[in-house]
Each structure stands twice: as structure tokens, then as C-alpha cells.
Amino acid sequence: MIQSIVFDIGGVLASDIWETMFLDPNKGLAKHFGLDPNAVHKFGLGLWEQYAYLDACCEEEVDFLEEDYWQRFMDEFDISEQLDFFIQKTYEFIIPVKGMMGLVEQLAPKYELGICSNNSEFFHTKLAEVLGLYKYFDPKKEILPTKIGASKTSPNYEMFKALDKALDTPKENVLFVDDRQKNIERAIEYGFNAVLLPQASDLGEEYLRRFFKMSNIKI
């Protein structure tokens, strides 16, 4: 019996911020500054590797990491722009997935909820603010690489071990929802139940509702 449901954020509850912000063909940074999308994507992956594991103990440290991140981007591509341009523009790319937060609201009174996300500290802070995550999720049951020092695909399952410890539910009664196959595979290997959601799809909510119905998970 499923007693706890854990959500990834990027691609599940909202669009992936950095990939969309860097590479959206209509309004992404590569398009805006006339940059090679392949070079931007490669550099963005490198930035993720550098900043995903950096913890911040207070708002000032979060701000410092965010400013440093964007300064690195500007230096790499020889861009002259105010830092605040990038910081404020981030909000344009926090795009909630249709219906998902409404579904979370329905689940919250009936299930233990958790978050397991590979977001960097400053992007996660903005996502939590815009989505209103802490209305439904206990921060103590929120697992991020910044706190663990490893990602969901790490060979030793550090994030899933931390999730297991944070939840009050035995892992055989936990359902993990993610949009990336490798993350789902690692969760299943660890012992969680898991479902692969179509990435940032407008039909994601309906997909989950049908899955819940077939799996006898009451909403």
C-alpha cells in the first residue's frame, strides 16, 4: 500500500529551469544573445555540476551563489549585462506543469509527501516560492544534492538513502515520481516504487491520475 508520494520538481511540477532558460528556441538565453545552443548547453551542464552540490546556510549565501553562477555565464560568453537581468529573468522560466500542484493539494491530506530534486540552491529557492511548495511539503522531507553532496544517479544511492531516512514510511510503501529514466531506475534499484512521468507534459496530471486509479491509490 502506498503511504508516501515523493516528487521530483523540474519536469514534474514545473519546467526544468536552466535547460529551458538557456535553450528555449523562442526566448532562451542562447536565442536572446545569439549564442551557439550546443555551446550553451555544454556550459550549462558544467555549471550544474559545479553548483548543484554547493549548500547555502542563509539568504545571503544563496544570493552570492546565484550571482556567481551568472557572472560565470557572462564571462564564458563575453556578455555585458546587469546581474539582475538574469536573476529576474529566471522567473519567466518557472512554468508550473498544468494541474500538478492541484493534484499535490489533493494528495497532501492523505499521504506523506516528499521532494527529491537535483536543483541547485538558488533555483530551488525560486521554485519553492513560485509554486508555494511549503504549503504541502515538509522541508525536512525535501532532499536536494546541495544537502547530500550527490545526485539521484550516484552509485551509492546517497539521495535515496537520505530520503528513506527522512520519510516515516517504509520504502516498499513509497512511490517516487520523476521524468528521467535513470532516476527512476536508481529509485527502483534502491527499493522504492517509481513511475516515469512524461517530461513537463500538459497531460502529466491526467497520466498520474490514471496511474493512481489503476494502482488503487486513492485521491
Image (spheres, grey):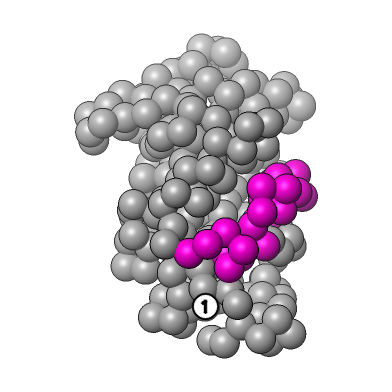
Residue 210: image location, x then y, percent: 71, 83
**Image location of residue 140, percent across then percent down:** 34, 52
**Residue 173 belongs to magenta span:** yes
- Give the left or right position of residue 72, taking residue 63 as reference: right
Apparent side of residue 158 relative to residue 126 in the rendered image (left or right): right
Asked if 63 appears above or below 170 in the picture, the reply is: above
Query: Callout 1: few (<14), some (14-19), or many (20+) C-alpha neighbours within 10 Å?
Result: some
In the shown orientation, is residue 74 left or right of residue 84? right
Residue that appears at 76% across and 27% down: 38
Where is residue 88 drawn, in percent x and y? 38, 42
* Residue 24 magenta-highlighted: no
Is residue 82 visible in the rendered structure shown here? Answer: no
Dot 1: element: helix
**Nearer to us in this view, 60 or 195:** 195
Placement of 118 over or under 3, stated as above or below: above
Q: Is residue 87 visible?
A: yes
Q: Which residue is mark 1?
A: 103
Q: Quadrant of the N terminus?
A: bottom right
Q: Which residue range is magenta in the image?
A: 169-193
Residue 37: name its quadrant.
top right
x 27%, y 27%: residue: 61
Which quadrant of the rendered structure holds the C terminus? bottom right
Rendered location of residue 201, percent (x, y): 69, 65
**Residue kind at label 1, given as amino acid type:** Leu
